[in-house]
């Protein structure tokens, strides 16, 4: 399985890439907090269905059993995911899908820094350089054009989402020896339910019944299956390294966003794209490569 770890990370990235442009479309009919809740519910229910299918086939369970010491990481994973996706959906209401997609690479920097600070993973000088470039590109994207120097509300919300997900990635890394399927179900169902606890008191109600199945299906693919393969990759690569391969996702998402919404990229976007791409290259490769 270890030889497929990089492939798992890239597959997870590709599945997640479709979420931002399609979520931007769904925001025309679904409020942001409710959308984030339904996406995670779709993720959890879909992966639960996969688990039922495995039991019917009597497939051997993958991973070691959960331990009592896992509890704080499970709780952290659920709460951080809830906050992250809510911020991302809110950010999408203020910013273009292509900008939001590219800003998602800030998650690389956040994951690596948290991995070093709290989980004792080594961060090389090369990776620090990559973190600097990715962060610089994020700043370029976040600055509002105009006479005054200010940051856009959408970019700040997406940056907050990346910080939450960066810490959450490290919580999930601790759980990577457990069953990826069970972790995905727990993450999806409980993050979805906690998302409803944010959406309903805020006055956001369920959308039209005709829209819900499509949102749940997107959640299953972009968050359920993506999380499943991401956890498998983390088991062999670690949190910081997995996040670097996962970094292809924002570029795929940005490309899809430009096509779907027929956005003409600005010079600011193109500059950030180049700086971000260099940073991701340094993060994903070794000096000899």
Image (cartoon, rainbow, N blue to C red):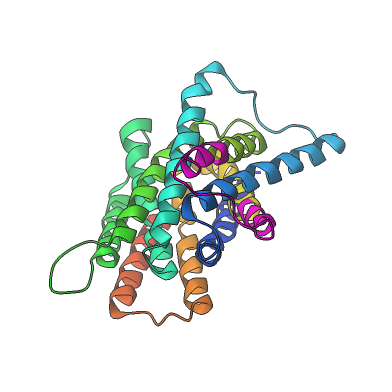
Is residue 204 within the magenta segment?
yes
Viewer can see residue 286: no
Q: Is residue 83 above or below residue 149?
A: above
Residue at the (50%, 65%) spot, across then down: 24
Quarter in which the C terminus is drawn: bottom left
The image quarter containing residue 187 is: top right
Quarter in which the N terminus is drawn: top right
Residue 41: x and y in percent read 62, 44
Residue at the (37%, 55%) spot, across then down: 158
Residue at the (29%, 66%) spot, across then down: 141
Residue 93: x and y in percent read 41, 62
Q: Is residue 202 left or right of residue 213?
A: left
Farthest residue in the front direction?
203
Q: Is residue 176 above or below residue 4?
A: above
Which portion, as a residue range, is magenta?
A: 192-219
Residue 193: x and y in percent read 56, 37
């Amino acid at each position: 399985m270890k030889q497929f770890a990089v492939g798992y990370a890239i597959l997870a990235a590709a599945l997640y890439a479709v979420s931002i442009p399609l979520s931007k479309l769904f925001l025309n009919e679904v409020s942001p907090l409710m959308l984030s809740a339904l996406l995670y519910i779709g993720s959890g229910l879909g992966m639960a269905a996969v688990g039922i299918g495995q039991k019917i086939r009597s497939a051997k369970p993958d991973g070691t059993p959960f331990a009592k010491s896992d509890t704080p990481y499970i709780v952290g994973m659920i709460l951080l995911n809830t906050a992250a996706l809510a911020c991302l959906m809110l950010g999408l209401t203020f910013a273009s899908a292509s900008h939001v997609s590219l800003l998602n690479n800030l998650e690389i920097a956040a994951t690596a820094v948290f991995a070093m600070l709290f989980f004792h993973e080594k961060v090389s000088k090369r990776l620090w350089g990559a973190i600097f470039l990715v962060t610089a590109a994020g700043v370029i994207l976040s600055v509002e054009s105009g006479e005054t120097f200010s940051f856009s509300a959408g970019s700040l919300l997406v940056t907050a989402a990346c910080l939450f997900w960066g810490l959450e990635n490290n919580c999930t890394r601790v759980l990577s020896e457990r069953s990826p399927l069970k972790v995905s179900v727990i993450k999806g169902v409980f993050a979805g339910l906690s998302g409803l606890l944010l959406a309903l008191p805020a006055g956001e109600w369920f959308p039209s019944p005709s829209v819900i199945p499509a949102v749940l299906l997107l959640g299953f693919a972009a968050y359920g299956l993506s999380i499943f393969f991401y956890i498998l990759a983390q088991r062999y690569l670690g949190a910081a390294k997995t996040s670097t391969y996962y970094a292809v996702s924002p570029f795929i998402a940005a490309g899809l966003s430009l096509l779907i919404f027929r956005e003409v990229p600005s010079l600011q976007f193109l500059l950030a794209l180049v700086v971000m791409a260099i940073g991701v290259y340094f993060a994903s490769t070794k000096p000899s490569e």
